[in-house]
Image (tube, grey):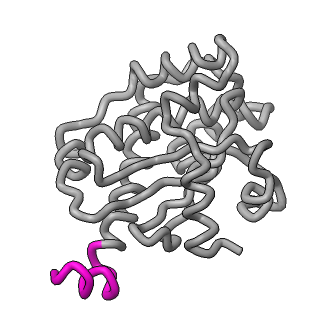
Amino acid sequence: MLTPEYLKSKFEAGLAYDAYVATGKPHHQEAWHGIHARVSLTEAQRAVLGGFTRQTYALVVSGTWCGDCSQQLPILKHAEDAAGGRFTARYLDRDEHMDLAEQLQICEGVRVPVCLLLNEDFDFLAFVGDRVLARYRAMAGRQLGSSCPLPGAPVPDDELSATTSDWIDQVERAHLICRLSTKLRARHGD
């Protein structure tokens, strides 16, 4: 069911970052804004994203109430801004789009955030979720008992930096898949 047509329709139903965050409760919005203000891309990451030549999309299933979402997804907004229009993300509330969320289960659970990276034709490129490796390493190191931190829970700077690197690497990987795609190279003559 994850056809390009279906994924495109879901992408079109999604909200841009600021509109999506605005749907959350005030204290949830504050958590998202707090992490967004702390994310900092390196010059090398900005150069990679700014050098994108193919349109790449992120379709994100999330919850504004979710700590993992608020602590990771602001990174994608920074990636969008740095990519100069060649990387665009749209966000869907998991509970309002359960038809998609159920198809993206991890270990038999409907989790958030999950992100599908798509090419210009809305073909599937990669799946990222529910946490990138840096987040899992940090959680394992702390041995937290809960499965999802609350929005606003402290995130150490080194963890945020490592999480940012993991997300940017995933976005770059998707773009390189597009750049090396036989179909897209033939289409774009490169």
- Residue farthest along the right direction in this orientation: 108
Image coords of residue 44 (percent x, y):
19, 45
Residue 159 visible to the viewer: no
Identify the residue at image location x=63%, y=35%: 68
Q: In the image, is 49 to the left or to the right of 120?
A: left
* Position of 83 relative to 148 (above/below): below
Identify the residue at image location x=55%, y=40%: 15
Tell which of 137 and 34 is nearer to you: 34
Tell which of 47 and 59 is nearer to you: 59
The image quadrant where one finds the C terminus is bottom left
Residue 42 visible to the viewer: yes
Image coords of residue 186 (percent x, y):
25, 87
Q: In the image, is 31 to the left or to the right of 50?
A: right
Image coords of residue 20 (percent x, y):
58, 32
* Position of 92 relative to 1 (above/below): above
Q: In the image, is 119 to the left or to the right of 143?
A: left
Image quadrant assignment for residue 45: top left
Stretch in magenta: 179-190
Q: Is residue 6 on the magenta stretch?
A: no
Which SS type dominates the magenta stretch? helix
Image coords of residue 62 (percent x, y):
66, 41
Image quadrant assignment for residue 179: bottom left
Identify the residue at image location x=66%, y=29%: 64
Identify the residue at image location x=30%, y=38%: 81
Tell which of 170 and 12 is nearer to you: 12
